[in-house]
Image (cartoon, rainbow, N blue to C red):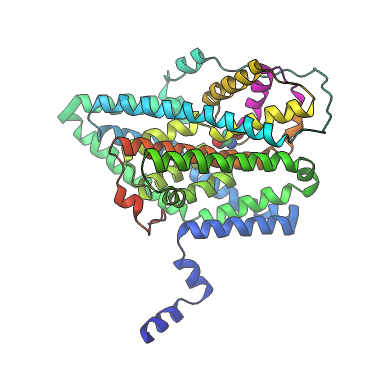
Amino acid sequence: MVKRMTQSSKTATPLGRWKRLQLWHKILIGLVLGVATGAIFKEDALVLAPIGTLFLNAIKMLIVPLVFVSLVSGITSMQDSAKLGRISIKTISIYMVTTAFAVSIGLLFGAVFTPGDGLNMIASGQETAKEAPSLVSILVGLVPSNPVTAFAEGNVLQIIVFAIAIGVSMNLVGEKATPAIKLFDSLAETFYKLTDLIMGLAPYGVFALIAGVVGSHGAEVLLPLAEVIGVIYLASFAHVVLVYGGLIGLLARLSPMRFLRGIAPALAVAFSTSSSSGTLPISIECARKNLGVSQGVAGFVLPVGATINMDGTAIYQGVLALFIAQAFGVDLGAGQYMMIILTATLASIGTAGVPGAGLIMLGLVLTAAGLPLEGVALIAGIDRILDMARTTVNVAGDLMTTTLVGRSEKELDVEIYNSPNHDGTQ
Ligand code: ASP
C-alpha cells in the first residue's frame, strides 16, 4: 500500500500522468481539446495550423516507402502464390460488397430522415460534371510505365503493382534473392519503427488539425445544413456498428469492441486529416500491432483499400443524392436508385484517398442519376465536416476487411488481437 502510494505520488504530476496514458487515450483527448479550442477561439485557432501540417507531412513522408517495402517484404514472406491470388479475390470482393451496402444504407437514411425536404431549391441546369474514369483506363493505368514516376507522384496503386511484381520475382529467384529479401525485411522494420515514432506526435497533430477545422467552420455555415450533417454522421455510425461490427463478430468470430479499440488511433487520425491515404501508415501499424494481422496481409489489403475502398464516401453519396433530390423537388424512380448504387460503387474505385475527393465524385453520381449539379455547390461549404466522417468510415472499412482476410487466411494472431494492453505505441 505504502509502496503503491509513493509510486503514484512520483508520477502524479500532470506531465507524469500524461506520459503514462495509452496513446489512443491521448489522441482522443487531443481530439476533444481540439474541438473545444476551435469552438472557443474560432479563426484564431488557425495559428496552430503549422503543427497540424508538420504532423501531416511526417505521415505523408512515410506512405510511398512504407507501402513499397512492407508489401515486398510481406509477399516474400508468403511463398505460396495461390494464396496471394486468394487474398486478392477476397479483398476485392469484400470491398465491393461492403461499398454497395454502404450506398444502400445512405439511401435508406436519406429516405427515412428526408433531410432535404422544405429547402425548395431551383435548378438552372447550367453546370457540367467531370467524366467518370472508365474501368479500362483504370486497369491500363495500374501498370507503371516508369516506377520512378509512380514513386514521385505517390501513385499507390501503381506502387502496389510494382511491389507485387518485385516480390513475386524474388520468390521465383529463390536462393540468390535471399540478400535482397533480407534487405527489404530490414527496411520494413525500420519504417515500422519510424511510424511508431511519428505516431507519438499524433495527439498534438490531431489537436491542431481539429482546432483549425472547427475554428474555420462557424455556426452560420453549419446550422442551415445541420440536418443533413446529422443524417450522414448517423448513417456512418450505423454502418460501422452494424455492418463492420456484425462481420467482425459473426464472420471472423472476434470481439467488435476490441476491433474498435485497436483501430482507434487510425480513426482519430482519419477524422482529423480527412485522408485515408495519409492515414495509411497509422492503419498498417494498428493492423499489425493491435489486431495482430500479418505484415503480408496488412501490407497488401490496406494500401489497396486506401485507394479503392470508400464506404464512407458511398454512404455520403447515398444520403446526398436523396438530399439533393428532395431539396430540388425531383422524384427518383427505381432506375435512378439502381444508377446511384452502381455509379457510387464503381466511382469509388477511381477516387483518391485525399481530402475533398468525394465531392468531385458526387458530381458524377448526380449526373448519372439525372440530378441537378448545383447540389455540389450547396454542399461545398460543409464538405470538410462531412469528409471527416466519411474518411473515418473509409479507414474503418479497410481495417475491417484486413481483419476478415487475415482471420480467414490464418494470418491473424488472436492473442495479440485480444491482448488488453495494445495501443499502437512502442
Ligand atoms: N477524403 C476521403 C478519403 O480520404 C475521400 C473522400 O473525399 O471521400 O478517404
Instruction: State which quadrant residue 367 falls in.
Output: top right
Count of all numbered marks drawn on residues in the image: 0
Identify which residue is drawn at 59% across, 38% down: 390
Task: Say which of 15 and 391 sits in front.
Answer: 391
Identify which residue is drawn at 48% across, 72% down: 16
- Is residue 153 at all visible to an observer of this figure? no
Task: Say which of 11 and 190 sits in front.
Answer: 11
Task: Say which of 358 and 197 sits in front.
Answer: 358
Identify which residue is drawn at 76% across, 44% down: 222
Q: Residue furthest top?
A: 136
Residue 304 horizontal/vertical position (percent): 43, 30
Q: Could you tell whether 350 is left or right of 143 in the image? A: right
Identify which residue is drawn at 71% across, 38% down: 228
Q: Quadrant of the C terminus?
A: bottom left
Residue 351 horizontal/vertical position (percent): 55, 27
- Is residue 334 at all visible to an observer of this figure? yes
Quarter of the rendered image showing ligand 1: top right
**Residue 367 inside the magenta-drawn segment:** yes
Q: Residue furthest left?
A: 175
Magenta highlight range: 357-374
**Residue 10 inside the magenta-drawn segment:** no
Q: Quadrant of the N terminus?
A: bottom left
Residue 110 horizontal/vertical position (percent): 67, 33
SS assignment for the magenta stretch, majority: helix
On screen, residue 3 above or below 296: below
Residue 175 horizontal/vertical position (percent): 15, 30
